[in-house]
Image: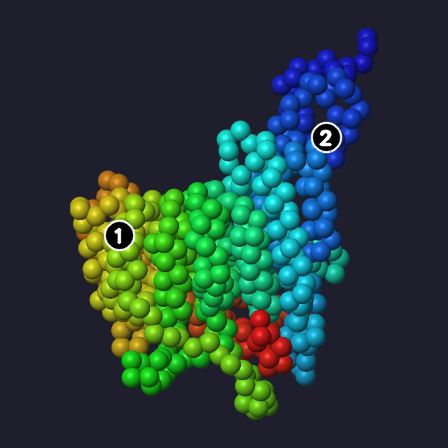
């Protein structure tokens, strides 16, 4: 009996075998037998090319330029690409905490200074060339006439000493280099998209799918406003003309000034929540301006996540003294026009969102959230870890339950308010389970089409439930997703350890961004 060969196997069985084989082995099998190559489709092979991660390093970008420039192979790879992930890369030495004087501190500035502006410009040029090659290939071969990619995601990774890449969500403490790399990655991505005129058709994910990774909202606002001023509206529209889903994760500046500029020109001190609210409103103004001017004409889903960071605070009197000697110009909140001016422009467009989600956001005025909901008219609303002034939820909930509103479903989770300067938790009445045993009532409420117009009942309580194992896990998960809110929340993140296995001091956990003054000064110009 002759031995069985691949050539006599049914096509369905061949495809099943191929589905378990890696790309290099598939290539070897196809090269080994012409008959086998003819009996296989390109389904599995295409799957490898449809999704690609691009590391923002010179060798990786230069190699990708070479591949996409190839007349046959490069054009084929470029045409298949649908899901692209841009990953900013850091070395472990740039984020690893070191023992400096008996305390865990950030590495010396020379180790975390990162790449200079010339390197960033060169990487932008290479990525632009890659995007142009992709657009050219798709324009020549794509029968649907779409010259862009479907999904663009931005991430940050750390390369360990053994060469293994780890996501930013696995880094325990030294966040500032990650935030710096995130803003560089965003800047490179936006500039390359605009220069190449490559469109993103379905979804733009700006660090939203990666926990504990974000970047300064001021950088986000400045970059987009600068590009809107430097380039024509047609350039922005051509890149985002078919974008349907925008996900972004942002945070306040690491060195917020903490001052409020009044109408009389005087400055008063801002609370932490007020600082977060001011910078979020800047972001909201920018996104709404993009929508009102037609740069996002087909947007259907908008998801904004806010990661809370504390402004820099010296750990010791010595660092505080050095901080006073080496002052850095800080970004200051400036008066913003009322939302009504932008919302009025938005009302003249045909934009109506299918889904609108806010998480980790703070508002200081009672009507801001309501105005945004009324203008965007989303069908589904998600509010997660929101802080509003006392009494502001009544109008929002009345709008959600109003039969005349377009809202058909919503998800409410971990809502809070501020009453006389104190944070209070919201407990919801409804058919839901508490987060863990010990809560008096649920803090989560999800309603679909059948129940969306039922009145939302709740109560606010200023006190916390006594701790338990489940409570500690909840607070730790909350800290990973939204930032360290209080000292007790930081202590709940009991899984954070130093590289040597010793527990990080509680004082440092409560202030995860309190690192050396030298690093702040070294990075202040970026």
Label 2 SS: helix
Tag nearer the camera, 2 or 1:
1
Choose between 152 and 250: the one closer to the eye. Answer: 152
Rendered location of residue 83, percent (x, y): 56, 42
Note whether residue 158 is visible: no
First in sequence: mark 2 or mark 1? Answer: 2
**Whole-Å distance between the Cαs marked 2 and 1?**
53 Å
Q: Quadrant of residue 32?
A: top right
Choose between 240 and 105: the one closer to the eye. Answer: 240
Residue placed furthest toward the top: 1
* Image-based side of 397 in relation to 28, left or right: left
Disc 1 designates what residue?
347
Note whether residue 44 is visible: yes
Q: Is residue 315 above or below residue 478?
A: below
Q: Quadrant of residue 49?
A: top right
Q: Residues within 10 Å of mark 1 (few under 14, many from 20)?
A: some
Residue occupying image coordinates x 50% and y 45%:
200
Choose between 7 and 198: the one closer to the eye. Answer: 198
Residue occupying image coordinates x 62% and y 18%:
12
């Amino acid at each position: 009996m002759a031995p069985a060969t691949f050539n006599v196997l049914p096509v369905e069985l061949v495809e099943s075998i191929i589905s378990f084989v890696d790309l290099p082995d598939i290539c070897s099998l196809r090269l080994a037998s012409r008959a086998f190559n003819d009996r296989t489709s390109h389904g599995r092979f295409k799957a490898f090319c449809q999704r690609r991660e691009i590391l923002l390093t010179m060798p990786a970008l230069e190699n990708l330029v070479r591949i996409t420039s190839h007349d046959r192979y490069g054009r084929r790879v470029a045409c298949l690409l649908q899901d692209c992930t841009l990953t900013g890369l850091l070395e472990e030495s740039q984020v690893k905490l070191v023992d400096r004087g008996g305390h865990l501190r950030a590495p010396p500035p020379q180790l975390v200074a990162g790449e200079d502006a010339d390197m960033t410009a060169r990487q932008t040029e290479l990525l632009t060339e890659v995007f142009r090659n992709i657009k050219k290939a798709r324009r020549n071969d794509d029968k649907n006439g779409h010259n862009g990619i479907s999904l663009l995601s931005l991430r940050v990774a750390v390369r360990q000493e053994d060469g293994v890449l780890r996501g930013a969500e696995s880094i325990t403490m030294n966040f500032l280099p990650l935030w710096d790399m995130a803003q560089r990655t965003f800047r490179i991505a936006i500039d390359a998209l605009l220069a190449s005129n490559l469109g993103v058709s379905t979804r733009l994910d700006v660090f939203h799918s990666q926990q504990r990774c974000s970047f300064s909202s001021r950088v986000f606002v400045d970059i987009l406003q600068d590009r809107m001023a430097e380039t024509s509206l047609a350039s922005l529209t051509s890149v985002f003309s078919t974008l349907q889903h925008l996900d972004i994760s942002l945070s306040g500046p690491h060195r917020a000034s903490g001052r409020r500029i009044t109408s009389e020109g005087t400055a008063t001190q801002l609370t932490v929540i007020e600082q977060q609210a001011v910078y979020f409103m800047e972001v909201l103004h920018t996104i709404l301006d993009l929508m009102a001017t037609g740069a996002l004409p087909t947007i259907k889903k908008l998801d904004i996540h806010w990661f809370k960071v504390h402004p820099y605070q010296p750990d010791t009197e010595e660092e505080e003294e050095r901080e006073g000697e080496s002052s850095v110009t800080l970004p200051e909140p400036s008066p913003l026009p009322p939302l009504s001016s932008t919302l009025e422009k938005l009302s003249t467009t045909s934009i109506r969102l299918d889904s609108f989600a806010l998480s980790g956001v703070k508002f200081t005025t009672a009507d801001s959230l309501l105005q945004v909901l009324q203008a965007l008219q989303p069908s589904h609303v998600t509010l997660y870890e929101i802080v509003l002034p006392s009494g502001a939820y009544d109008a929002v909930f009345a709008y959600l339950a109003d039969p005349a509103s377009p809202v058909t479903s919503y998800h409410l989770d971990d809502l809070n308010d501020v009453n006389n300067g104190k944070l209070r938790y919201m407990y919801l009445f409804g058919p839901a389970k508490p987060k863990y045993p010990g809560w008096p009532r649920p803090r989560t409420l999800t309603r679909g089409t059948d129940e969306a117009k039922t009145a939302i009942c709740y109560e606010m309580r200023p006190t916390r439930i006594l701790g338990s194992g489940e409570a500690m896990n909840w607070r730790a998960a909350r800290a990973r997703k939204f930032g360290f809110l209080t000292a007790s929340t930081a202590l709940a993140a009991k899984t954070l350890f130093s590289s040597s296995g010793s527990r990080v001091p509680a004082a440092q956990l409560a202030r995860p961004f309190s690192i050396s003054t030298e690093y702040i000064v070294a990075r202040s110009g970026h």
